[in-house]
Amino acid sequence: MSVVIHNLQRSIRLNVQRLERDVRYLRRLMGLTSFHMGIQCVEDDYIAEANLAYRGVEGTTDVLAFPLLEELEPGQALPEIPEPDRRLLGDLMLGIPYIHKHSQLHEEQLEETLSVMVLHGMCHLIGYDHETEDQWKQMYHKELRILEQFNQKTGYSCKPLLGIGHG
């Protein structure tokens, strides 16, 4: 199924083709290729507004996830949806300038940091969260397993996000 990426920001030069390739591979590793998803790459002010509107949290952030499959438990099989057009996973919003600052601060490549943020958001789309330490550990280990395989394929050195309130 499709992934639609809209680069709505102009602050940071973004290789959208590389992002698309990395997202396709992450989706394959996650077993999510039979579902549609969307990604919006936005400016800091836009994601800050969305963060306040949808989470009640002030300020910019790295990734927001808008899942369309209700009440999934981490690790649970995704529902069987016979109609391909109705297999909608959800949308991610990436705060590109915020992610760019994060990558520079940690001396990482932007593409690697973007891949980690996309994977993190995809985990949220399928029911993972990090409100408690147990939830965070479960999500961290899921991301770690996927990123180990992803790194082997891409030559990247991506690592999962650290901490409950990562960003």
Image: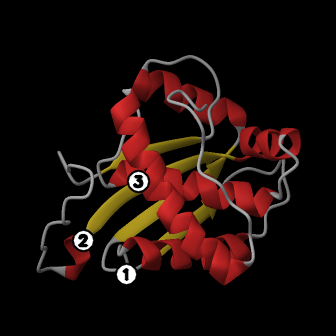
Indicate which disc, 2 or 1, sits on the residue closer to the N terminus.
Answer: 1
- Per the image, the residue denoted by label 1 is 1
Assess whether mark 3 and mark 1 are in contact (beta carbons under 8 angstroms). no
Disc 2 marks a residue whose amino acid type is: Arg
Residue 152, numbered label: none
In this image, 69 relative to 11: left or right?
left
Query: Marks 1 and 3: which is nearer the front?
Result: 3
| Among the 4 quarters of the image, the one containing residue 158 | bottom right
Residue drawn at the location 67% of the way across and 53% of the way down: 8
| Among the 4 quarters of the image, the one containing residue 85 | bottom left
Assess whether mark 1 and mark 2 are in contact (beta carbons under 8 angstroms). yes
- Per the image, the residue denoted by label 3 is 123
Task: In this rendered view, identify the residue nearer to me: 72 or 17.
Answer: 72
Indicate which disc, 2 or 3, sits on the residue closer to the N terminus.
Answer: 2
In this image, 102 relative to 86: left or right?
right
Residue drawn at the location 86% of the way across and 38% of the way down: 105
Q: Secondary structure at mark 2?
A: loop
Indicate which disc, 1 or 3, sits on the residue closer to the N terminus.
Answer: 1
Residue drawn at the location 63% of the way across and 61% of the way down: 115
- Per the image, the residue denoted by label 2 is 87
Query: Marks 2 and 3: which is nearer the front?
Result: 3
Disc 1 marks a residue whose amino acid type is: Met
Q: Could you tell me how many numbered marks the image carries?
A: 3
In this image, 67 relative to 82: left or right?
right
Assess whether mark 3 and mark 2 are in contact (beta carbons under 8 angstroms). no
Q: Percent x, y for residue 93?
A: 54, 48
Q: Secondary structure at mark 1?
A: loop
Local crowd size for mark 3, using a 10 Å CA cut-off: few (<14), some (14–19), many (≥20): many
Instruction: Tell me the CA gap for discs 2 and 3.
Output: 17 Å
